[in-house]
Amino acid sequence: MRPVPASSPIVIAHRGASAVAPENTLVAYERAIEQGARLAECDVYLSSDGVPFLFHDSELERTTNASGPVTERSLVDLKQLDAGSWKGPEFAGERIPTLVEFLEAVKGKLRPVIEIKGKDREIEQAVINALHEARFPSEDAMIFSFHYKVVAEIARLDPSLPTTWLVTPPEPGEDLGPFFRAALKARVSALGVSHDEVTLPFLQRAHETGFPVFVWTVNDAARIRELTAMGVDGIISDRPAMALGVLGRNTGN
Ligand code: G3P
Ligand code: CA
């Protein structure tokens, strides 16, 4: 398995510094950099004309001034939308970034963690193409996905691109063997688990099998201390400055 950065747990800014700026927009990543983050997560879909772009929900309502399914919009359509006002008037007019725009904006400042939300129309190759277009080395990025097929396909297309499979761990008492055999088969580099679902037996078995474990979304200092004591390898937080501060790493990872 590929190593995680030297200081563990790593801190990953969730959708940028999304507690203080509109998630998945460039200003959220500027804020994450200001807060000392060295890694930041984004969510990615393909537009109807095949361009990967940053967005979390499958529908537009919550975070834009439009409605309906995001993947039915062309890039030109998506670029008309206001993706900032919902968070506050100071963010009015903030646009939905393409994945290439995001990568170019963070290059040399943040390690991108790209969560692939969609699972159709060869989104894996489109994401790899975006990394190439932005001249971003594969090993400097990470791919996350809940979709087993997506992480397996990324590992097949570009083995140098680290992948994290986001999972619900098997129930306590359930045989963990089939789960970990599937993870090994897909050649994933790490596992991601909701912080309220991670258990010590799961964490220990993941480590024995060679998988770091990252947990989301942790915005509470006491919980970060507990998870660090348990031995998790990554904390995904909307509040990277707080998380780094709790870990005594205000200058980043
Ligand atoms: O990083 C994993 C986490 O982002 C998954 O949940 O809903 O925030 O995309 P969600
Ligand atoms: Ca996500």
Image: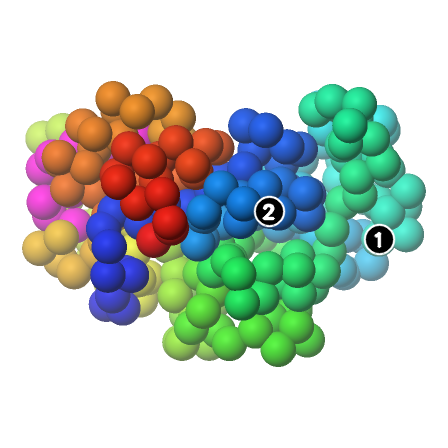
Colouring chosen for the image of the structure: rainbow
Where 19 sits versus 139, above or below? above
Dot 1 alpha-carbon crowd within 10 angstroms: few under 14, some 14 to 19, many 20 or more: many
Where 141 sits versus 229, above or below? below
Where 103 sits versus 73, above or below? below
**Residue beneath disc 2:** 29
Left or right: residue 240 versus residue 214 is right
Q: Nearer the viewer, mark 2 or mark 1?
A: 2
Q: Earlier in the sequence, mark 2 or mark 1?
A: 2
Give SS at disc 1: helix
**Residue beneath disc 1:** 75
The location of residue 2, given as percent across then percent down, is: 27, 68
Part of the protein shown in magenta: 194-206
Left or right: residue 2 versus residue 81 is left
Q: Residue at x 76, y 60 (%)?
A: 50
Where 184 sits versus 194, above or below? below
Query: Can residue 148 be seen from the camera position used here?
Result: no
Distance between the alpha carbons at the discs numbered 2 and 1: 21 Å
* Disc 1 residue type (three-letter): Leu
